[in-house]
Image (cartoon, grey):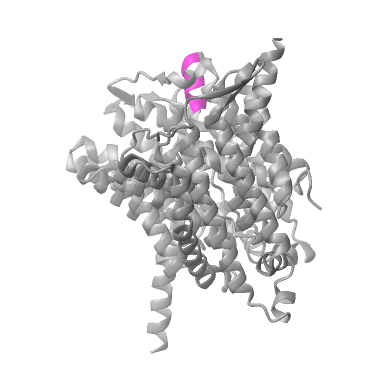
Amino acid sequence: MNTLKFSIVSIVVGAAVYFCGRLIGIGYVFFAGYTILQFIALSSAWNILGGYCGYVNFGSAAFFALGAYTTVFFYKFHPLPIPLLIMIAAVVSGIVGFGMGYLTLRLRGAFFAIATLAMAVVLQTLVVNWDYVGGSRGAYIVRTETVEIAGFSIEYIQYLFLLMMAVAIIAIVISRAIGRTQLGFGFATIRDDELAAEASGVPTLRLKLIATTISGALMGMAGAPFPYYIGYLQPASAFALDYGVNSIAMPIIGGTTSWVGPLVGAILLGSLQQLATVTISSAVNLLIVGLLLVFFVVVAPNGLVGLVQEHVRAWRKK
Amino acid sequence: MDISLLINAIVAGLLLGGFYAAVTAGISISFGMLDIVNIAHPAFIILGSYIAYFAASSLGADPILVSLLAAPLFYGLGAVIYQIYYVSFERRGQESLRGLAFFFGLLFVTEVTLILTFGVDYRYVEAVYIGPSLHLGDIDFPLRMVVPCVAALVMFGALQLFVTHTFTGRAIMAVSQDQLALQLMAADPIRIKRIAFGLSIATASLAGALLIIIQPVEPSVGREYIGRVFAICVLGGLGSLPGSLVAAMLLGVMESLTSTFYGPSWSPAVSFGFLLLTLAFRPSGLFGR
């Protein structure tokens, strides 16, 4: 299936999910669904750098927050429609992703991971001290009850849900397309043996910069509608490490080698967390994620997708 | 600029730096010498704080004494973690991505377990040396900073003597340079690494007690230290304990000056900014080879 067909199929599936949500007719479905879609976008974005290239980014929260604060900035400066804000956020986070990559990607593995964590804290400190976007007090975003699209009036949360659906689809389509082109093979050579790749003429630095830019831009896009979703944004919630740990845990639990893993991981873990938040508490939530992450990296290093593939292979041999 | 304010800020920074050295010691061993990116180290430090808090509040014991008694337990914990790490990742050559994720997961499990057990309230300990302060002219030496600094320096000195003057210590230095060569000398590198990693976690016990003497602690405080410890470790040059000590002092002074003259909300950016600059322009650190 080529990328165009795949995009069309994704859009159809997305639309089907939306209308199923409308049939259920409970507002909470969209509220919870938004979070899961957001995690699909974040984990697919993380996987482009982390899963394909093998470079661990702990600073997903920083890119997410960049997107969110781009929205806050324009909200104060001159309110723009959210689709436009998503595009601007993509540009801003993409540039920061490129800059970070340029500064740190000559470092191997662990140093890069630590540098991303460091960048998240530096950005958070800057935002805390920047009064225009609310500083440490946070910023309120007022949204309307309903929104008009092409003559139809729909609830705002449904509008946000649809936007996030679009972002998630974009992230998945890009992630899948990369995996099937020369770019993806280049990324895989970096993951497997960077030195050998470099020696064979793979332009590793350029490829890594492409990966950080795309990955950062997608994370920013996932963050842009967030202030409208939550209504009140403060640095602690935008830069929460939860985003960091979730966007790592989901691909690893799902499987990092293809676009399917992050999708499966995000849907499973995202739904599980929604369930745990409602039934138990939000602290238990992170405990579950942490335990599952440790369990999967130790026991099933290739994630759920890897487990299924092993079973299929064993079954075919019989 | 007020000169006594400046001197006070520098003294406070040096004392703080001594404490940072204690926090970094474990990372200097695990990351610097063994190449294990133990990003969960600060979480173990917080665990140490809570053990000190628990013993101090229920038994009235001295936090530093408690931490020394708890250190063997931490050593055991470290040895077990290393064994899991070795079997699951290092042996298969998968330590970079999955090993990092493993420690990141441990960080969260430890932190959330502490939150579920003790809640998110700030906890603190009582001890005779918390409160009073020595004065030398205009300069203050608050004992709650002096005691941790001295304890940290003693620990650092002991570690340095251990790695340079004992067989096991020298073997740890050797394993960081050439594992195969060590194996050819009939020393088991895995055993040496297990000892070293156990030791690195054991330092978290003392560092945790010192932390709760200096400031009230809640479970997520550890995150602030992730950047600091790695900044210090990289700045000092990997695998160099004296380098780490100097870097810790340097960072302490810079943070103290920043928070005195620009306000405390800027001080987290100092360590992380420094780390980013070091990584970008001099990845081998100030004292690295």
The answer to whether residue B135 is above or below residue B27 is above
Task: Point out residue A25 in the picture as x, y percentages from the top left corner.
Answer: 18, 38
The residue that appears at 46% across and 35% down in the rendered structure is A223
Q: Nearer the viewer, residue A19 or B170?
A: B170
Task: Point out residue A68 in the picture as x, y percentages from the top left corner.
Answer: 47, 30
Residue A170 seen from this side: no
**How many numbered callouts?**
0
Q: Quadrant of residue B136?
A: top right
Residue B242 seen from this side: yes
Q: Is residue B114 left or right of residue B164?
A: left
Task: Point out residue A258 in the picture as x, y percentages from the top left corner.
Answer: 50, 61
Residues rendered magenta in the picture: A69-76
The residue that appears at 39% across and 53% down in the rendered structure is A290
Q: Nearer the viewer, residue A202 or A4?
A: A202
Q: Quadrant of residue A179?
A: bottom right
Task: Point out residue A281 in the picture as x, y percentages from the top left corner.
Answer: 25, 43
Q: Quadrant of residue A116?
A: top right
